[in-house]
């Protein structure tokens, strides 16, 4: 019985040698001091809000937004430039092989319908498309596609929100059309050209 009682001693003294086959020396005084401490700590935990949940934390409005705010971009604060490169990071723009479409998509998540698709006019990027011309020159952003006009992009929402908007970039293989002056390459040439191409 004493050996079981001694196990509650939090102040036992470690020894480098054994006494009665034990590595630690226990005392009744240490047990009497330890047991009340254990009960006090257990009582504090049992009556804390971690267990009883009597005082829930109410989030401020900034942490409890019903919907996520929309972010708006235009050429004054953002430049969208997209390139199609090969494995050597060489970029090409050739409408006889492909074209890029930059769109702002607005979706009704309740009905899962696209409410509006805002296709932007595009152009080959030049230094005027960048707020910092040094960036264009330093990174040699050539053969990239930019938005041709100073239009606004809006992105916002989430898949669980009522509304969602996002930016979509589509690469489309060239197709011969009667109203277009572009003469497409053959299907074999297009497939070979687009093999191992990446967005950048």
Image (cartoon, rainbow, N blue to C red):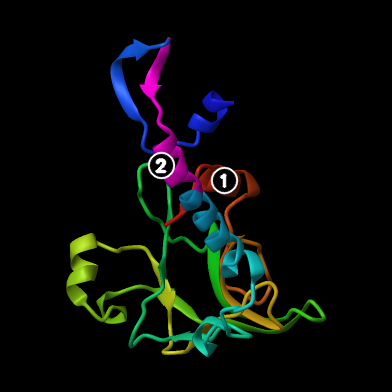
Q: Is residue 135 above or below residue 115?
A: above
Q: Residue at x 62, y 84 (%)?
A: 67
Q: Residue at x 55, y 83 (%)?
A: 59
Left or right of 139? Residue 97 is right
| Nearer-the-camera pick, 85 or 178 | 85
Q: Residues within 10 Å of mark 1 (few under 14, many from 20)?
A: few
Q: Is residue 144 above or below residue 146?
A: above
Quarter holding residue 92: bottom left
Q: Which residues are magenta?
A: 21-35
| Nearer-the-camera pick, 194 or 80 | 80
Q: Residue at x 38, y 65 (%)?
A: 144
Left or right of 79? Residue 64 is right
Left or right of 88? Residue 39 is right
Observer able to see residue 169? no
Question: Which residue position holds label 2?
Answer: 87
Question: Which residue position holds label 1?
Answer: 189
Marks 2 and 1: CB-CB under 8 Å? Answer: no
């Amino acid at each position: 019985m004493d050996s079981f009682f001694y196990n509650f001693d939090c102040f036992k003294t470690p020894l480098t040698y054994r006494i009665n086959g034990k590595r630690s020396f226990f005392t009744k005084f240490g047990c009497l001091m330890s047991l009340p401490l254990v009960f006090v700590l257990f009582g504090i935990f049992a009556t804390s809000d971690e267990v009883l949940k009597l005082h829930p934390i109410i989030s401020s409005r900034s942490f409890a937004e019903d919907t996520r705010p929309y972010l708006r971009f235009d050429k004054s604060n953002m430049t969208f430039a997209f390139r199609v490169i090969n494995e050597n990071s060489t970029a090409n723009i050739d409408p006889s092989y492909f074209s890029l479409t930059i769109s702002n998509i607005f979706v009704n998540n309740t009905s899962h319908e696209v409410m509006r698709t805002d296709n932007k006019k595009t152009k080959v990027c030049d230094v005027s498309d960048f707020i910092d011309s040094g960036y264009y020159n330093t990174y040699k952003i050539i053969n990239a596609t930019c938005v041709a006009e100073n239009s606004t992009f809006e992105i916002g929402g989430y898949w669980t929100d009522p509304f969602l908007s996002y930016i979509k970039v589509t690469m489309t293989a060239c197709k011969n059309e009667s109203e277009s002056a572009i003469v497409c390459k053959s299907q074999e040439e297009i497939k070979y050209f687009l093999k191992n191409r990446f967005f950048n």
